[in-house]
Image (cartoon, rainbow, N blue to C red):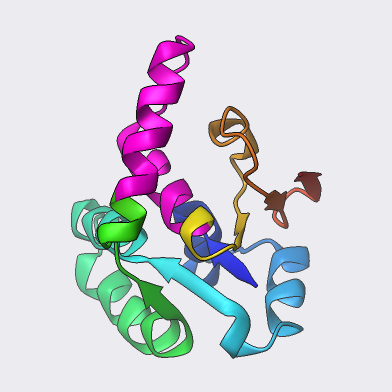
Amino acid sequence: MYLFDTDAISQVIKRNPSIPFIRRVASIDIEKQFTTAITVGELVYGALKSNRPEYFIDKLERLVWPNIQILPFDEESAKIYGKLRAELERKGTPLIEPDLRIASIAICHDLIIITGNIRHFLKIPGLKVEDWIHGRNEN
């Protein structure tokens, strides 16, 4: 099962999306596709900062949210987040907040993160990450 990061989800609403990404998503049952409330916030923020906010919000509302399960940053995810953050800071390799919260949710639900930014997640032990946009995997 798969958890789509912000850059992956944004492919769905881009003018020229990654064709390999779109094909791969289309081949996966909708029951196996997830994103996070963190990603929802990032996408809404990006849409509202764009020069066509109504257009992008409409695309998100019509094409994205109805077709994916959105997972919260809940108590269990928060506990994982706290452990990961402390561990990464001890090692001197902190991660930016949204990515660490997304990773915590993925670990909590045993999901593979789909992202074009694999390097953002490589420091997290045990996290499975795949790049369907550029065709790279790290596990």
Q: Quadrant of the C terminus?
A: top right
In the picture provided, is 55 more to the left or to the right than 139? left
State how many labels appear: 0
Residue 70, x across and y down, in percent: 38, 75
Q: Nearer the viewer, residue 53 or 12?
A: 12
Q: Nearer the viewer, residue 134 or 16?
A: 134
Q: Residue at x 42, y 57 (%)?
A: 105
Above or below, 27 against 85 in this view is below
Q: Nearer the viewer, residue 105 or 76?
A: 76
Above or below, 79 against 109 in this view is above
Residue 72, x across and y down, in percent: 30, 67
In the picture provided, is 51 more to the left or to the right than 95? left
Q: Residue at x 39, y 16 (%)?
A: 89
User: Chief secondary structure of the magenta span?
Assistant: helix
Answer with the quarter of the image where residue 1 lies.
bottom right
Residue 55, x across and y down, in percent: 29, 74
Q: Residue at x 45, y 22 (%)?
A: 88
In the picture provided, is 78 more to the left or to the right than 133? left
Can residue 87 be found in the magenta stretch? yes
Can residue 4 be found in the magenta stretch? no
Answer with the quarter of the image where residue 23 lies.
bottom right
The segment highlighted magenta reads 79-106
